[in-house]
Image (cartoon, rainbow, N blue to C red):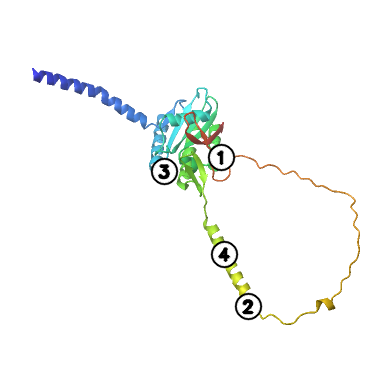
């Protein structure tokens, strides 16, 4: 009797595992998914190729990429939709969730690139502007696959170069800070200036103590004259010259800094977007 009960119990366990294990497999595959083509812009082959590139980039540069296409952002701006999708999906590498998301919104004909973690410092304002120009050309031509490939090409080069010199991501504030940085050129200039100043000081002191002071005294009181001529100046008019100084344009494209903002969950993001 005990043998029968044991057999039934074993069969029940095996049957349960038969149904449960595939579910775990599906969840694992879903967690590894990085391309969400809700707008159906890509073929299966395109998606597989994108997933492979994303995996390679993540392993090489420790930054995770997510590609999302949609016909509706559910009332959110492309920026808010992209930021929330990335955060809620739990994407990113490490505690700072390093990575970025490329959104193509077909419903509003807009796109957005959302960066997070250390990737904010890497894909800075200047690089975002360059990336936008390159992406828009493909999107306006209707080449969505080309836009994604351009995105991969540009961001890979940025990840390879790393952040601009002197700029780092501050995990506590969620912003990019500029640190003091001495370039090799500045170091050389400082050394040359220091040496030149030292040489000039040495020559000055050496010359001063080498020459003997003359004992001759010129009788300037007896040998000099002063001739003072009276003159009157009359003010006739005032002239004022004005010049307009234009304000510098604010295109967020210069330097190595990165503008940041916070999503609905309080996480910091960088990036930018546009229309096509």
Q: Residue at x 69, y 80 (%)?
A: 213
Numbered disc 2: secondary structure: helix
Q: Residue at x 21, y 21 (%)?
A: 15
First along the sequence among labels 2 and 4: 4
Residue 222 shows in this picture = yes
Residue reaching furthest bottom?
Answer: 215
* Marks 3 and 2, how far apart at CA: 64 Å
* Residue that numbered label 2 is attached to: 209
> The N terminus lies in which quarter of the figure?
top left
* Residue that numbered label 4 is attached to: 194
Asked which quadrant contains residue 46, the reply is: top left
* Residue that numbered label 3 is attached to: 61
* Marks 1 and 4, how far apart at CA: 40 Å
Percent from the top left, x then y, of residue 256?
Answer: 54, 45
Query: Quick check: marks 1 and 2 in contact, CB under 8 Å?
Result: no
Asked which quadrant contains residue 21, the reply is: top left
Percent from the top left, x then y, of residue 172?
Answer: 46, 40
First along the sequence among labels 3 and 2: 3
First along the sequence among labels 3 and 1: 3
Numbered disc 3: secondary structure: helix
First along the sequence among labels 1 and 4: 1
* Residue that numbered label 1 is attached to: 129
Residue 142 shows in this picture = no
Query: Quick check: marks 2 and 4 in contact, CB under 8 Å?
Result: no
Q: Viewer-nearest of labels 4 and 3? A: 4
Q: Viewer-nearest of labels 3 and 2? A: 2
Q: Viewer-nearest of labels 1 and 4? A: 4
First along the sequence among labels 1 and 2: 1
First along the sequence among labels 4 and 3: 3
Q: Closest to the observer: 211 or 88?
A: 211
Count of numbered labels shown in the rendering: 4
């Amino acid at each position: 009797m005990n043998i029968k009960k044991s057999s039934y119990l074993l069969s029940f366990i095996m049957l349960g595992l038969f149904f449960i294990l595939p579910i775990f497999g599906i969840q694992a595959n879903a967690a590894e998914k990085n391309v969400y083509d809700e707008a159906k812009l890509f073929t299966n082959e395109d998606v597989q190729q994108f997933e492979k590139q994303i995996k390679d980039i993540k392993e090489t540069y420790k930054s995770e990429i997510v590609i999302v296409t949609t016909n509706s952002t559910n009332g959110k701006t492309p920026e808010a939709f992209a930021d929330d999708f990335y955060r809620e999906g739990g994407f990113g590498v490490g505690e700072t969730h390093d990575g970025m998301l490329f959104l193509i919104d077909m419903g509003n004909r807009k796109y957005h690139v959302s960066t997070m973690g250390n990737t904010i410092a890497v894909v800075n304002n200047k690089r975002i502007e360059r990336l936008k120009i390159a992406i828009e050309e493909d999107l306006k031509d209707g080449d969505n696959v080309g836009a994604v490939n351009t995105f991969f090409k540009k961001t890979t080069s940025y990840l390879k170069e790393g952040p601009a010199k002197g700029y780092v991501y501050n995990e506590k504030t969620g912003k990019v800070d500029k640190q003091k940085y001495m370039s090799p050129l500045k170091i050389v200039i400082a050394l040359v200036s220091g040496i030149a100043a030292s040489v000039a000081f040495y020559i000055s002191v050496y010359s001063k103590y080498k020459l003997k002071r003359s004992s001759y005294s010129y009788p300037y009181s007896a040998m000099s004259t002063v001739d003072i001529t009276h003159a009157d100046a009359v003010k006739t008019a005032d002239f004022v010259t004005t010049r307009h100084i234009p304000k510098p344009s604010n295109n967020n494209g210069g330097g190595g800094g990165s503008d940041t903002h916070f999503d609905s969950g309080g996480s910091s993001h960088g990036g930018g977007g546009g229309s096509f």
